[in-house]
Image (spheres, rainbow, N blue to C red):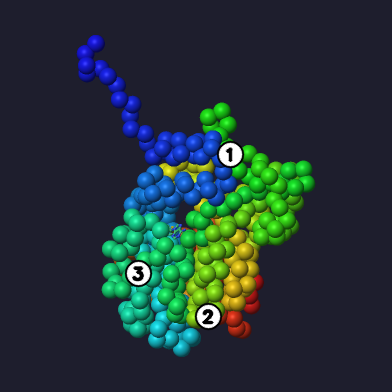
């Protein structure tokens, strides 16, 4: 046998490495909470999904409103301008964004401010972003003098904040419970015959049931029904809302979501197609439908006000997206106009993002209905 025939096994892929890590944790400690599974699969520094440079956009795995058209960021920019003015243009304010992705939304907001509210361009920008790769992309895209990155909301400066979180809360890890014979049990991740899958865990305790506040609205709970809980969303919302309570400001929360936590909404997406949660570990984005009822409850408990949610279509139309698109279209040629109106349709059309996406607003406690929100809170 020639000494050239020795074989090296191929280097393990990121997916294999994550699978091995999960197996070893499950063998040592037993089944994992779904939130721990998601944290590893998305956040592992070497093999997790967020190690990627460009998960967002046509060449990535999913496209956000901010990447569809500059119209979206411009409308958010116009809105924050209005909130800044309504708050009396506080001198020590900051601009914030949670999970800025490629930085397009912030860049498009600044584009508008340059034309209509240049004072907002001078406010320091504070971005909450955990991915080192995306921080680099944001730095290049936003091109501002004063940007500070934070790993969490807690380290933001003590000052009024004006900001936005688009498709941020859906990315946070959730836990699930499953209804079995009259009780809610934790739904955990385990390895069965060498394959990852779900298993029932212990029943939720009374304090857990009080925290989860499972609401099934008009839907019937049957054997195997699923409920969800996002602990990280509540911690972040608590910190964000208490800052707004103490220092003032306004923050838009935009995401696909609903007003309860009933049903299984976990989804994995790779190259714009749904994939199995346990397939392509670390190569697919994992998200869930945001529970706006929990966000609202947490914001109110932190002393602030949560206006909405209303649908993205209702919000964007109420603040004038149609007029803005028609105005912009005047300076485009026929093909430019076609793509502009296609983007408009994706943002507000009921079969695209218009109704699945909701918009909520955190402001200090007060009365009245802010522009864009057709009704009082809720
Ligand atoms: N807002 C952007 C991107 C949304 S994707 C857009 O609209 O295009 C989700 C973003 O949240 C990514 O930037 C991701 O890296 C970031 N992210 C996910 N979990 C996070 C966490 N726990 N803390 C801070 N940022 C997080």
**Quadrant, the C terminus:** bottom right
Few, some or many C-alpha atoms within 10 Å of disc 2 (few <14, some 14-19, many ≥20)?
A: some
Which residue is disc 2 drawn over?
246
Q: Nearer the viewer, residue 93 or 271?
A: 93
Q: Tally the marks.
A: 3
| Residue count near mark 1 (Cα–Cα under 10 Å), binned few <14, some 14–19, many ≥20 | some
Secondary structure of the residue carrying tag 3 is: strand
Mark 1 to mark 2 CA distance (whole Å) = 43 Å
Q: Mark 3 points at which residue?
A: 148
For residue 140, above or below residue 320: above
User: Which of the two discs, 1 and 2, labels the residue nearer the N terminus?
Assistant: 1
Q: Earlier in the sequence, mark 3 or mark 2?
A: 3
Numbered disc 1: secondary structure: loop
On whether ligand 1 comes within 8 Å of the CB at mark 1, the answer is: no
Task: Read off the residue under disc 1.
Answer: 30
Between circles 3 and 1, the one closer to the viewer is 1
Q: Is mark 2 within 8 Å of ligand 1?
A: no
* Nearest to viewer (mark 1 / mark 2): 1
**Point 30% across, 64% down: residue:** 139
> Where is residue 154 drawn, in percent x and y?
47, 69
Q: Do the residues bearing badges 3 and 2 touch, measured as CB atoms within 8 Å? A: no
In this view of the protein, can residue 122 be seen by the observer? Answer: yes
Give whichever of discs 3 and 1 has the lower sequence position: 1
Q: Which of 254 and 199 is in front in this view?
A: 199
Q: Are marks 3 and 1 in contact (CB under 8 Å)?
A: no
**Residue at image location 66% in from the left, 41% down from the top:** 200
């Amino acid at each position: 046998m020639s000494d050239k025939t020795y074989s090296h096994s191929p280097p393990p892929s990121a997916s294999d490495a994550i699978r091995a890590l999960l197996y070893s944790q499950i063998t040592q400690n037993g089944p994992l909470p779904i939130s721990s599974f998601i944290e590893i699969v998305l956040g592992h520094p070497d093999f997790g999904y967020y190690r990627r440079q460009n998960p967002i956009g046509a060449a990535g795995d999913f496209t956000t409103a901010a990447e569809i058209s500059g119209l979206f960021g411009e409308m958010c920019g116009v809105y924050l301008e209005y909130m800044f003015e309504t708050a009396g243009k506080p001198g020590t304010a900051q601009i914030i964004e949670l999970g800025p992705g490629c930085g397009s939304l912030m860049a498009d907001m600044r584009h508008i401010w340059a034309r209509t509210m240049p004072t907002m361009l001078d406010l320091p920008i504070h971005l909450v972003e955990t991915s080192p790769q995306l921080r680099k992309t944001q730095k290049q895209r936003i091109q501002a003098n004063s940007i500070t990155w934070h790993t969490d909301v807690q380290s933001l400066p003590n000052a009024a904040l004006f900001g936005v979180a688009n498709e941020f809360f859906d990315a946070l890890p959730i836990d699930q419970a499953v209804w079995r014979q009259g009780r809610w049990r934790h739904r955990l991740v385990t390895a069965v015959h060498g394959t990852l899958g779900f298993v029932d865990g212990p029943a939720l305790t009374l304090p857990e049931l009080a925290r989860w506040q499972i609401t099934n609205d008009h839907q019937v709970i049957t054997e195997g029904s699923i409920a969800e809980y996002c602990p990280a969303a509540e911690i972040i919302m608590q910190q964000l809302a208490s800052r707004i309570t103490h220092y003032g400001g306004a923050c838009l929360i935009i995401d696909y979501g609903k007003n309860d936590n009933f049903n299984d909404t976990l989804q994995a997406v790779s190259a714009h197609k749904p994939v199995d949660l346990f397939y392509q570990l670390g190569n697919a984005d994992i998200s869930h439908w945001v529970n706006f009822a929990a966000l609202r409850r947490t914001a109110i408990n932190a002393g602030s006000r949560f206006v909405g949610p209303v649908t993205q279509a209702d919000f964007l139309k109420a603040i004038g997206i149609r007029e803005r698109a028609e105005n912009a279209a005047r300076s485009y040629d026929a093909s430019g106009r076609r793509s502009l109106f296609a983007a408009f349709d994706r943002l507000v059309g009921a079969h695209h993002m218009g109704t699945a996406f909701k918009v909520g607003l955190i402001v200090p406690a007060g009365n009245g209905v802010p522009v864009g929100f057709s009704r009082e809170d809720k």
